[in-house]
Amino acid sequence: MVAWYNTATLTKWFEPNEMRYDFYQAKHPWGPWTYLNSYSDRFIVGGHMYGPSLCAKFQERTGSEVRMSLFTSGCPFEDVPPGLYKMWEIPLVVKTTPVADSTLINDDDARIVYSGNWQSSTKRGFSDHNDDVHCTASAGDSLELTFTGTGIDYLAEKHGDLGNVDVYIDGVLKQNVGLRLDNFPRLCQIVVFSVGGLPAARHTIKIVSRSDAHAVVDAFRVYGSNA
Ligand SMILES: [Ca+2]
């Protein structure tokens, strides 16, 4: 069950504040409901969800994950031309099995080995983890992180001035990840790449910038590890 609400008193109906979603669970037959988790739209910088709705019609189960569509419209998004109302679809994944313990590794962690012209950007004032990221505007710059665990998430921003990166796991190219997102506010702490089901052992993730537009790394979340 999901309940969503605006956390602040609206002074103007067209200026939404933080939108929060509370998730509850219960066994069949339904009830009593117990609180499970809460989710905020604070990852959107400079805008909030306007008239959001979760649409069950488009939900789809894949393995232990249920994918839903979250629709929202309007918003003071960095849109051209301004004033047009648009409908946005945001994918939302609900996991039906417990998630393995995880550890967050920030981009300034000494275990991350940066090669090239990476810069540390701190006190960004967005919603990045620890308010910082590492970024580069040079194609070919790379980083490596060796971790012990069964999976890893790569957290970054998505924005119109960002480029794309190749992600390697244990030396094998897994995915070219696009960080560029046009006609939308800056998004923070987005899981832009995820891999699971690895043998519980040491692994290496390598990220290589593939364009002269900025590449960004905010943090890594390692699963199944005591790191
Ligand atoms: Ca960070």
Image (tube, rainbow, N blue to C red):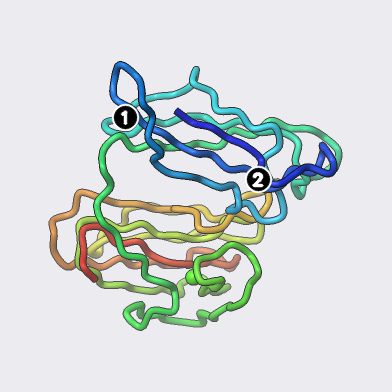
Q: Residue at x 30, y 65 (%)?
A: 205
Counting other residues with Cα less than 10 Å from the Cα at mark 1, is it few (<14), some (14-19), or many (20 or more)? few
Q: Which mark is residue 200?
A: none
Q: Nearer the viewer, mark 2 or mark 1?
A: 2
Q: Residue at x 78, y 32 (%)?
A: 85
* Residue 93, percent from left and from top: 42, 37
Residue 70 image-quadrant placement: top right
Instruction: Note whether 2 is above or below 205 in the view shown.
Output: above
Q: Residue at x 50, y 61 (%)?
A: 156
Q: Is residue 168 left or right of residue 93?
A: left
Q: State the residue position of label 1.
A: 62
What type is the residue that disc 1 sits on? Thr
The one of 157 and 16 positioned closer to us in this rendering: 16
What type is the residue that disc 2 sits on? Thr
Pointer 2 with pointer 1, Cβ within 8 A: no
Instruction: Note whether 33 is above or below 206 in the view shown.
Output: above
Q: Which mark is residue 7?
A: 2
| Separation (CA) of disc 2 from disc 1 | 32 Å
Q: Residue at x 37, y 60 (%)?
A: 167
* Residue 84, percent from left and from top: 82, 35
The one of 164 and 183 positioned closer to us in this rendering: 183
